[in-house]
Image (tube, grey):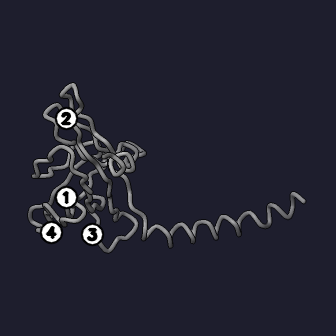
Amino acid sequence: MNKNLFRILPLVLTIALIAGCILHNNVFYTPDIVLKKDGQPCISIPANEDFFMRKKEFSILSLYVFQRRVGYLWKKNFHDYEKPYYVKNQQCLYFNYRFKTNILYSISFFSTEKGNDESHKSTNKDWTRDMRIIKKTDGTLQLLLDGEARDYS
């Protein structure tokens, strides 16, 4: 029985790898979002994106702020190759938008690893997350993410 397992295991792993590569094209990644002292969000690429601590940089190709039933509130593309926009993981991205309280926002951006262009599919990543900043009864601000932000009323 163990011999059959060792014969089948490479096949199963190969199928899993192929399926993972095919599904990778439709995957959205989740950025980190925290509130800064000024009440605005710090949106960043998570620490685990630089797993081997190589001090990797990411090229940001576009940033978007979207509100359901309204549309795009703000967007910025960085396709000027003479002025690229690079960040490291955990570095706040520059969203030139003043977020207000009690509005459900969908934040998204597109990145690739520095030195790669958009044709290298393995390093292209679509990042997206829903967020809402609420003002609590004591006057402090609280960040709600994803389902909690969508379900808040």
Closer to viewer: mark 4 or mark 1: 1
Q: Amino acid at mark 4?
A: His
Residue bearing the label numbered 4: 79
Give the percent coordinates (x, y) of residue 80. Answer: 11, 68
Label 2 and label 1: CA atoms lie apart by: 18 Å
How many discs mark residues in the rendered view?
Answer: 4
* Residue at x-position 42% and y-position 64%: 27
Placement of the N terminus among the 4 image quadrants: bottom right
| CB-based contact (under 8 Å), mark 4 and mark 3 | no
Judging from the image, what secondary structure is the residue with disc 4 in? loop
Q: Residue furthest front?
A: 153
Give the percent coordinates (x, y) of residue 128. Answer: 32, 57
Q: Earlier in the sequence, mark 2 or mark 3?
A: 2
Crowdedness near tag 2: few (<14), some (14–19) or many (≥20) residues, C-alpha within 10 Å: few
Judging from the image, what secondary structure is the residue with disc 3 in? loop
Residue bearing the label numbered 2: 36
Q: Earlier in the sequence, mark 1 or mark 3?
A: 1
Residue bearing the label numbered 3: 117
Q: Amino acid at mark 3?
A: Asp
Image position of 140 with respect to 28: above or below: above
Q: Which mark is residue 65?
A: 1
Label 4 and label 3: CA atoms lie apart by: 11 Å
* Residue at x-position 11% and y-position 52%: 97
